[in-house]
Image (cartoon, helix red, strand yellow):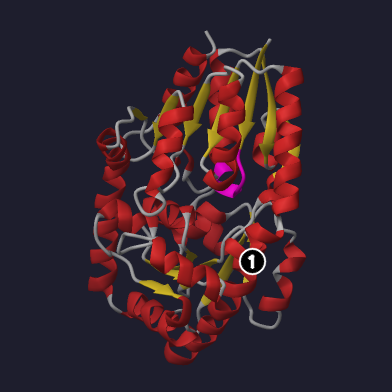
Amino acid sequence: MKRILIIAGEASGDLHGSTLMHQMKLIEPDLSFRGIGGSLMIKEGLDALRHIREMNFMGFAEVIRHLPLIRRTLHSLESLIDTWKPHLAILIDYPGFNLKLAPIIKKRGIPLMYYISPQLWAWHSSRVNLIRRYVDRMVVLFEFEKEFYRTKGVEADFVGHPLLDIVHPSENRAVFLKKIDSDTIPLIGLLPGSRLQEINRILPVMTESIAIVREKIGPVKAVLGCAPDIDESRYIPFIKGTGILPLVGKTYDIMAYSDALMVTSGTATLEAGISGTPMVIVYRTSPLTFQIGKMLVKIPNIGLINIVAGSRIVPELCQDEATPEKISEHIVNYLTDRVLRDSVKQMLNAAKNNLGFPGAAQRAASIAMEMTL
């Protein structure tokens, strides 16, 4: 039995890690996976040293506060590597932690695949030196990343984006809308992120935005996409009495069937873009993290769908700009201006075409299994 160490530290990594594991098992069923992941990876057979909910920190202050846990986890993984002796290590995004683990893996001569590049093209490009030194195969999701690494002296495999195979609603539009009692009024989707810190900072302004939208245009249905690894009770204080309906496991239905979306910056903007639904990207973090980020980030857009498109095709409201008044203004425009809505849909579809072709996880799995030979 081949032993695979696999590390993901956040919800998107758990999603992509689970599809990669599934495809690897289709190639060779007799595999053993250990490491860090979430519920989706555990369902695929991961023996988890830690769950992502323990490791999913956001912002510089949070990372500093959790340094003791990070050090203990690195030490535990080092012990696991020495006793279990994996045939392959796969690191998924999560660079602050994974690039500390990479030298430990390399020192022991274990083949190392990095799946899903950190956003080094946006900030912290000096980390390319660590990837050049410690990573055997860099597997990237965007074609521009392959070119970025080539200019830095690193050969990267472009496999396309696995979300093209994943982002599909679970049921028919008419059935879904009837179930949530929105077949006769506009539907607005709220996607406040997969971290508690994001939810606490961003969901309140989203809920206030819904109230303003209703004042301006009348009845609308609002649904909240709940992250699978966050207890639903965490959302209740923010939506109680608002008429907002929380839904678990229906994120892609919300994205596909809403008339407009409020989306926290991150992978969800790409998922919503693939669904083709106009959105407002919202981002709020601690003042310290935001100021440090402003100094480090080198690109004009933070929303992945805008980055892939090469221009700002949907609005981004960050920090003090992310107010209920400004969010609601964009949502109202989407709901009342058909020309605008159709134009944004066309641009989202064009951006989707930049993501390559379906089958990305299968191609990545083939690379991973080659590395175990």
**129 inside magenta stretch:** no
- Quadrant of the rendered image containing residue 44: top right
The magenta segment is: 8-13
Task: Assess disc 1: are there few (<14), some (14-19) or many (≥20) residues with their C-alpha within 10 Å of its C-alpha.
Answer: some
Q: Position of residue 332 (x, y in %)?
A: 38, 81
Q: Position of residue 24 (x, y in %)?
A: 55, 21
Q: Residue furthest top?
A: 373
> Residue at 31% across / 60% down in the picture?
299
Decide which of 240, 243 is in the foreground and name it.
Answer: 240
- Above/below status of 215 relative to 284: below
- Quadrant of the rendered image containing residue 153: top left
Let me know if residue 172 appears in the view.
yes
**Residue, disc 1:** 197
Give the SS element for disc 1.
helix
Decide which of 365, 178 is in the foreground and name it.
Answer: 365
Q: Is residue 219 left or right of residue 32?
A: left
- Above/below status of 289 relative to 106: below
**11 inside magenta stretch:** yes
Name which residue type carries label 1: Gln
> Residue at 71% across / 79% down in the picture?
240
Q: Residue furthest bottom?
A: 215
Q: Is residue 46 left or right of residue 143?
A: right
Let me know if residue 180 appears in the view.
no
Q: Position of residue 334 (x, y in %)?
A: 34, 74
